Image (spheres, helix red, strand yellow):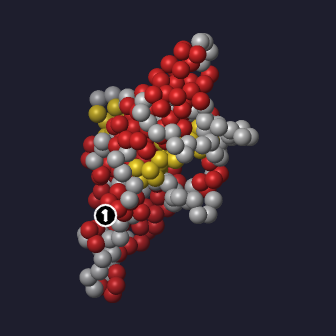
Amino acid sequence: MNEPEAVQSLAALAQNMRLRVFRSLVVAGPEGQTPGLLSEQLQVPAATLSFHLKELAHARLISQERDGRNLIYRANFDRMNALLGYLTEHCCQGESCSASPLNRESLPSTPTENRVSNSPLNVLFLCTHNSARSILAEAILNSIGKGQFKAFSAGSSPRENQKPNPLALTVLQQAGISTEGLHSKSWDDFAQPGAPAMDLIITVCDNAAGEVCPVWPGHPATAHWGYPDPSEVQGTDAERLEAFRVTLHAIKRRLDLLVSLPHERLESMALETTARTLARQA
């Protein structure tokens, strides 16, 4: 690779969404992905995605192939490795060093990779009021996380003196899940200096997913797992309680899949794709 080609490649990657598209294709490997799947995983409109794919293809960072009625996009690993080689050529004055792209085992591990092996992954669940769905998700993951996950929850617009919905606490207790320490709080609490750094942020209601989020320290992976709001169900006390129980089981099914995944699916580059894939399951 020469200098103009390196500049072209780096320029194509110097945009948030294009970088996320490219990384998703890297994670997908040789099988590649369809535009529809990419659009769903990255939560980006098809027209916007098409523009970014064209820019990446023009820089020869990705390839396109038709498979029947589908288009398949793949990362151009030769081009990626050529860029890495150009950037690290003659590194350390030609001496052998840990920065070589061929010696990835000696590179410093990412924060998420360190956390996978040494401490839990921090997961923040968000909804509007932090009283029902996000509270359920926090409690469930802390219960089944097997020490690999530490769950938190917050709301985009919690009411003054907001507290967890009593029906949410009831179904958790009936399921044998601890409710100790559960309380409603604003998502701003997790954007402050000194707040625990999140590895994954999951919105569990459509309102929170559509709002402008704070700037999260560490640029965590994000995903949206939408669930109907059980607190909006009308009916008898038993019917309302059943709505919360149904929501609890729906959330738990997806979290059961998350905690059962192998470590490599939870590493930093794969975590966002993994979480967004789970949004289509269970």
Say whether residue 11 is visible.
yes
Disc 1 residue crowd, few under 14, some 14–19, many 20+, Cα 10 Å: some
Which residue is the extreme one toward the top? 236
| Residue 233 spot, x, y in % from top left | 59, 18
Up/down of 74 relative to 97, above or below = above
Left or right relative to 46: residue 57 = left
Left or right relative to 146: residue 239 = right
| Residue 150 spot, x, y in % from top left | 44, 50
Image quarter in which the N terminus is found: bottom left
Image quarter in which the C terminus is found: top left
Nearer-the-camera pick, 185 or 215: 185
> What residue is shown at x 35% (from left), y 37% (from top)?
256
| Residue 198 spot, x, y in % from top left | 50, 54
Which residue is the extreme one toward the right? 160
Left or right relative to 142: residue 63 = left
Say whether residue 206 is visible.
no
> What residue is shown at x 28% (from left), y 68% (from top)?
104
> What residue is shown at x 53% (from left), y 58% (from top)?
196
Q: Amino acid at mark 1?
A: Asn
| Residue 144 spot, x, y in % from top left | 37, 41
Report helix, strand or loop for mark 1: helix
Q: Circle 1 sits on which residue? A: 81
Up/down of 32 relative to 279, above or below = below
Nearer-the-camera pick, 85 or 281: 281
Nearer-the-camera pick, 79 or 167: 167
Up/down of 107 relative to 220, above or below = below
Nearer-the-camera pick, 137 or 207: 137
Quarter residue 76 falls in: bottom left
> What residue is shown at x 35% (from left), y 62% (from top)?
118
Number of dots carrying numbers: 1
